[in-house]
Amino acid sequence: MGKPAKPRRLPDTEAQAVGRSIRVSPIKLNAVARGIRGKEAGAAMNLLAFSRKGVAKDVRKVLASAIANAENNHNLDIDALFVAEAHVGKNLVMKRWRPRARGRVGRILKPFSQITIILRERAREAEAEAKAEGG
């Protein structure tokens, strides 16, 4: 006897994946996320594969996970997927220190981030909009 399942927060045409505890600052991670927002899923994968940013490898793993979730868990068409949302948030910050002159201390902050990628199916989105306008 366990807890009841949580209701699904996203519509049926969407799938998501979350990457937590990525060891990079949110500003650097957001620069990569900004590049894939609104792009087709395949084009975003290619963009991340050839990106010169180091964190692009972690973002690519999260995007691949979102695509797998869409295909296996929600039966969405992979070719019709695009990155509807890619938002970045702060996670924990490790605080370290470095000795400085005259017995003082310099703080070093080592931030972690998290990224949420939401994929949406383009064909069903157009059908839903047309149904909403007509009905």
Image (cartoon, helix red, strand yellow):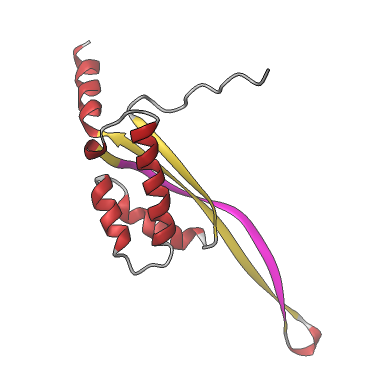
Magenta segment: does it hold 88? yes
The image position of residue 56, as x and y in percent, is: 39, 61
Q: What quarter of the picture does the C terminus occupy?
A: top left
Indicate whether 98 appears above or below 25: below
The image position of residue 15, as x and y in percent, is: 38, 34
In this rendered view, identify the residue nearer to me: 71 or 98.
71
Indicate whether 99 appears above or below 47: below
Quarter where residue 96 is shown: bottom right
Quarter where residue 123 is shown: top left
Give the side of residue 110 with respect to residue 49, left or right: right
Give the side of residue 74 with respect to residue 19, left or right: left
Magenta segment: does it hold 32? no
Q: Identify the residue at image location x=20%, y=22%.
A: 127
In this rendered view, identify the residue nearer to me: 34 or 41.
41
Q: What quarter of the picture does the N terminus occupy?
A: top right
Q: Identify the residue at image location x=35%, y=31%.
A: 14
Q: Identify the residue at image location x=79%, y=89%.
A: 102
Residue found farthest to the top: 135
Q: Which secondary structure is most common in the magenta stretch?
A: strand
Q: Identify the residue at image location x=38%, y=67%.
A: 53
In this rendered view, identify the residue nearer to me: 79 or 21.
79
Quarter where residue 54 is shown: bottom left
The image position of residue 61, as x and y in percent, is: 41, 52
Q: How many marks?
A: 0
Residue found farthest to the bottom: 102
The image position of residue 21, as x and y in percent, is: 57, 54
Where are the magenta residues, as a range? 83-98
